[in-house]
Amino acid sequence: LDQISPDTFNDILETETRIVETLYPRLLGLLDDSHNPVRMASCKTLSQFLTLAHSCIGSSKKECCLGMSSLNDITSTLMVQLDDPDAEIQHCVFQVLMVLLNLQYTNANDCLRQNGTEIVEMMKRHATMALNSHRDGHYCHLLLEKIQSCEHSKSLS
């Protein structure tokens, strides 16, 4: 996915509309693989996928490639994986969450302007709930701090 431009991804979506619905659940499923290299590769690919999916708004598209339900599924699964016993996996998963968070503030398409606040609130909700169930809430706290920092920066601009 890292070699596909947003325009090419958008062209693919014009003809293969189910690609988003098919690809992200498979990437999330790979996070449960027993081999860490597979899980880390899944995180990297998921980050690239999120970036492409959020840039796929063309003039003929009126909504995001990933709806709130899909983003909720992705965030929920990532929060579960954030409690992995392996610190390297936790870090990789956290990086995917950072990609999702940063897209809300750096991508200026209409879809994100409409849903950005809702997505950030959903991420806050998931992180807050995970604090009660994770063995170590370090990354949950860090995610909440990043969200707060982004919100503060946005309010200043």
Image (cartoon, grey):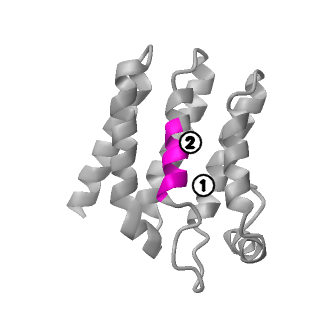
**Dot placed on the residue nearer the N-terminal end, 2 or 1:** 1
Task: Bin the neighbour count of mark 1 within 10 Å (Cα to Cα): few under 14, some 14-19, many 20 and up.
Answer: many
Q: Position of residue 123 (x, y in %)?
A: 40, 44
Q: Give whichever of 9, 142 is nearer the camera.
A: 9
Instruction: Identify which residue is drawn at 41% across, 19% down.
Output: 133
* Vertical arrangement, residue 51 with respect to residue 109, above or below: above
Q: Which residues are magenta?
A: 68-76
Left or right of 123: which side holds 35?
A: right
Check if residue 70 falls in the magenta segment: yes
Kindly state the secondary structure of the residue where label 1 is placed. Answer: helix
Contact? badges 2 and 1 (CB < 8 Å): yes
Quarter of the image for the N terminus: give it. bottom right
Quarter of the image for the C terminus: give it. bottom left
Residue 153, image quadrant: bottom left
* Vertical arrangement, residue 106 with respect to residue 88, above or below: below
Q: Which residue in the protein does label 1 denote?
A: 50
> Which numbered marker is on residue 96?
2
Kind of residue sitting beneath label 2: Val
Instruction: Identify which residue is drawn at 73% across, 24% down.
Output: 36
Kind of residue sitting beneath label 1: Leu
